[in-house]
């Protein structure tokens, strides 16, 4: 499946060869190496993170942990409707920035295996590159525990659960963008926003929304073509 131009719908050729490895950055500089013990640990995680099993397991575990956190929060705490609704909105809104920040400064930063794995995704968008499936659920649980230091436990778990729900939606959206050709002009434009990022990696870091790209000045703006003068 090829990427498509968001305005014309024309197919844009990309590699589908899973054996292609990416350069560490646009200038071709080698990625910074980890200390030997971490390098030893990174190898099996790298193999796992490029497997079809990991991609499927990640989509399932991301959705599962979001449901468990939200359900536990609702069961644990006697929450009032308005604060609970505000917590839901805060969690989803917070995730939009987490998504942007992680993509821009973690996956496109000098961050060793995170950068290397994401570079592989840029070379082969149809590959299986993803975080090890157990990492996001562990992070979301840790986030819930951290929130519980400042909030009632029920609200803390609900907040973490909604951030996890945002992450699950991101994962499903990202897969859909790369494997599905949308008929709706609105959906094609939405998918095209991320497709542009694969050709202009310094722009359009948001996947589920372009809000933070607009606010932080990283939204891609197509340069007008120079007019052709006829003599």
Image (cartoon, rainbow, N blue to C red):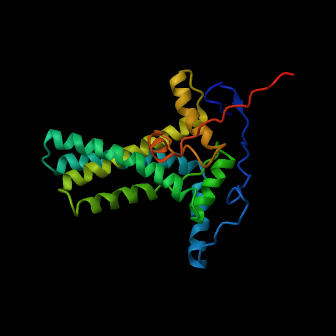
Quarter of the image for residue 229 reads top right
The quadrant of the image that shows the C terminus is top right
Residue 80, percent across and down?
A: 13, 42
Q: Nearer the viewer, residue 66 or 143?
A: 143
User: Where 92 sits versus 7, above or below?
Assistant: below
- Answer left or right for 228 relative to 187: right
Residue 146, percent across and down?
A: 29, 62
Quarter of the image for residue 1 reads top right
User: Where 150 sits versus 11, above or below?
Assistant: below
Q: Residue at x 56, y 74 (%)?
A: 38
Quarter of the image for residue 63 reads top left
Task: Work out whether residue 215 can be spotted.
Answer: yes
Q: Nearer the viewer, residue 110 or 168?
A: 110
Residue 199, percent across and down?
A: 67, 42
- Answer left or right for 22 relative to 72: right
Residue 4, percent across and down?
A: 65, 31
Q: Residue at x 59, y 37 (%)?
A: 221
User: Where 28 sits versus 162, above or below?
Assistant: below
- Answer left or right for 164 relative to 120: left
Task: Work out whether residue 131 can be spotted.
Answer: no
């Amino acid at each position: 499946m090829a990427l498509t131009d968001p305005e014309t719908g024309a197919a844009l050729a990309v590699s589908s060869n899973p054996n292609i490895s990416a350069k560490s950055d646009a200038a071709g500089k080698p990625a910074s190496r980890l200390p030997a013990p971490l390098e030893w640990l990174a190898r099996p995680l790298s193999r796992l993170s490029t497997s079809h099993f990991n991609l499927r397991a990640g989509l399932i575990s991301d959705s599962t942990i979001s449901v468990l956190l939200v359900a536990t929060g609702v069961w644990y705490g006697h929450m009032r409707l308005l604060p609970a609704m505000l917590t839901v909105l805060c969690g989803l809104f917070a995730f939009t920035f987490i998504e942007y920040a992680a993509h821009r400064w973690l996956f496109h930063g000098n961050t060793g295996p995170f950068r290397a794995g994401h570079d592989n995704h840029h070379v082969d968008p149809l590959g299986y590159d993803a975080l090890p499936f157990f990492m996001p659920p562990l992070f979301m649980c840790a986030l819930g525990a951290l929130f519980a230091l400042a909030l009632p436990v029920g609200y803390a778990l609900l907040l973490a659960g909604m951030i996890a729900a945002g992450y699950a939606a991101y994962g499903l959206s990202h897969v859909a963008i790369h494997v599905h050709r949308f008929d709706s002009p609105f959906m094609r434009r939405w998918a095209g926003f991320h497709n542009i990022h694969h050709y202009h990696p310094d722009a359009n870091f948001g996947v589920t929304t372009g809000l933070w790209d607009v606010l932080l000045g990283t939204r891609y703006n197509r340069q007008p073509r120079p007019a052709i003068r006829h003599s």
